[in-house]
Amino acid sequence: VNPGKERGREPTQHEPQIPSGLDPFLLREELLELWCLKDLQMLRLAAHRGFSELAEPLEDLLSILEGCPGKQKGRSHTAGHCILMEFQAWQKKHPQFLNLTHYSLTLQAMTLQQRALFLLPDQQLSFLDSLIDVYQLKSADVALLQQHLVRLQSLNLYKEAAMLSMKLQCQKELDLEEMCVPLILQNKLSLAESFVTGHSHLEERLVTLLDSWCHPSFCLGDIRRRFPHLSVSRHCLDQIQPKMLTKHVFRLMEKFNIDAGLCPNARHKRRLDSLRFLMYARFIERISMTEENWAAQYVVEDEPQLQVQLVQMLVKYSGLQKASQWSLKYSVPRDQLPSELSVLLRQVDLNKSEQTEFISPPSQREKFYQVPLTEDKIVFVDTPEALLQCQKVVLKEGALVGVDMEWQPTFGCSSTQQVALMQLAVMDQVFLLDISTEGFSQHSNTVSFIRSLFSSKNVLKLGYSMSGDLRCVLATWPQFSEEPLVTQSVLDLVHVHQKIQHSKVNRTQTGSKEVLKGLSLLVQQVLGRPLDKTEQMSNWKRRPLRASQIRYAVADAYCLLEVYRVLESNPAHFGLPDDLRDISPRQSEKRKDKKPKECQRAQRVSRPHCDKEKDLLCGVQPSADSPPLPPQQLRVVCDNMLQGLGRTLRCLGVDVLMLENGDDHRVAAKLAQAEGRVILTCGQPFLTLRSQVGEGRCLSLDCSEKAKDQAVRVLRHFNVQPTPSDIFSRCQVSGVSPDLGVNQESVKRIVYPIWCQNASGTRG
């Protein structure tokens, strides 16, 4: 090393003149030869000795790296990567001659940085970090960095450009669309997310960009014309569809905490899909819903465009009379309505009398459980003063309180559900806490009361599936996340119910032909009559509440007290221990009954007692001598994790409902309860759904299996044997029997033999 030739000046006449240092090209040849011999120890010694003999180590290192070959077969790193690592190790011992700031007064520093930038594409991340550190690229001229990144983009190296820009922390200086749109088109949305993460302005722009692609008038061709040299696969194009884009918009809105008002297109798409589902559920599947609790009105309540589409759908599904009523309800402009509606609009009477009495109609009193209280015992609590009176009764020492909550169904339009109404029942009163009242829910007295209620050791709280209620409590009151909510003396009757279901006594449903699940089944088994669940999916945020909603809310809380009193008075009759609070979740019992993994999935549906003609529809495993079940009689609802299975079963003629990607898993339980369907799911939701629909109504499958193998497992479990006439008898999209414009007989002759081979355990 020439000690006098420091960067930026020539040696003085008193300093010794040493000939120029080692030729970097000779050093490179020596190092590459040792690299090929895989002698890394000698390579390290030769590299450190050679770096000390270089006249310009920083400049000569670039000459060495520029001539190194790329990645070789059988080597995890490149030769250049190894040399660079050794240079960094040597640099720590010789920092005095390797500071790039010596070049700051000349163009040489910029030249070295520019040469270093040309080495970065197609390199490993560790190589990238080391080169950036050695040549101080983060402090390089912004114009130089932009010029290089634009060059990478012109070479269609968008991934490399994004990664380099993140390493250099210069995202703000780049055009977001020019950087992220090609990444999205190449199915690299996760990299685009990383590109904007930490920069609020870029995060918002990415989400609004994806939302603009959800607009019905969006044309992908316009985007592709902006990047004509970009190769886009068919798979990537399939990912850039409104349904998938909507899913990503909602996910990123939550991840980046973006205001939902900035994404009107994704919200409209999600609500339109929910509206179509509700229309299908009510008018095709005939799920029992009253006019008031039909959730379609919640979906369209603040979007005039969706209200128009609701009316247009009603014309198709329900007729002009019903469509006319809803068009008047929402004051839909006449010029946006189908022409045939104008004739009937004058004949619609929206002022139908609605029952306002608290007492149920005689037909309902005979069929469903009734609360033994008069209307004056139902107390609405929506002020701090009323809450004080409620607190004196509910928090009395030794009190027994039935706790239930109602919330607004979101249908995937929101990731959290907040409590709208909380019911607290004691033996002679029911308090309805109106959490939707502005200023009441977040009042300090309300928050303090909720905390005291759940933490009190002297008040026994009864609930059913309390975990879901507590999740909504945390979503409603963030204070309980900051200072955790303590729960004591809480008895979840779902565990008691599970104990009853797995005992050998009192398991037969009587008095109702409906397929009963959850709390309604428990009330039926203990009190003799089930709950009326008609108002379950009501709009619980709308005020005033209807009389039928109040009856439903009161019954859901008060029945817990009566069930507990009956079970406590004679626990042995129901196969329970003397103290119901000794019952815990059935984790230990599950371990005892553990079965081999291969057969465990097929045996998770057990055999409840059902009416003979409905055995197969109740999820019962058929006996060996039972006749085959036609596919049309198997009615299932597939969780959104098994959409491929749902389409496969539809191809075979099975009656299938499928959840959309954004739907909550609990929607499957509600559909199964309403229609007597069997739930097909996988993974963690199985435990939640099984507890909501009861034993024998939920089948867990292996999500790692292919849809075809899952379908074989389902058909074997229910003894379903499709015939050639069943193949393609239903549409994969709608589930109905469409008039397909293909020669079905020709397709069946090809597909049916292959299916039979797969069903018998062989590969076709």
Image: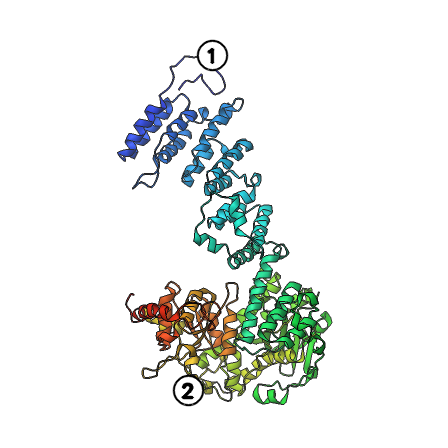
Q: Which residue lies most toward the right here?
A: 385
| Quadrant the C terminus occupies | bottom left
Judged left or right of residue 210, residue 19 is left
Q: Is residue 488 among what the camera can see?
A: no
Residue 217 location (% of width, % of height)? 58, 55
Residue 332 location (% of width, % of height)? 69, 67
Residue 301 vertical placement versus 252 (above, below): below
At 48% across and 85% down in the image, what residue appears? 571
Query: Mark 1 or mark 2: which is in front?
Result: 2
Q: Which mark is residue 178?
A: none
Label 1 sits on what residue type? Answer: Thr
Give the residue pinned by disc 1: 12
Q: Looking at the rendering, which quadrant does residue 41 occupy? A: top left
Residue 660 location (% of width, % of height)? 51, 65
Q: Looking at the rendering, which quadrant does residue 487 occupy? A: bottom right
Give the residue pinned by disc 2: 612
Q: Is residue 684 among what the camera can see?
A: yes
Residue 566 vertical placement versus 536 (above, below): below
Judged left or right of residue 173, residue 635 is left
* Closer to us: 85 or 700: 700
- Contact flag, marks 1 and 2 (Cβ < 8 Å): no
At 50% across and 44% down in the image, what residue appears? 227
Residue 120 vertical placement versus 104 (above, below): below
Judged left or right of residue 759, residue 344 is right
Q: Looking at the rendering, which quadrant does residue 398 occupy? A: bottom right
Judged left or right of residue 634, residue 472 is right
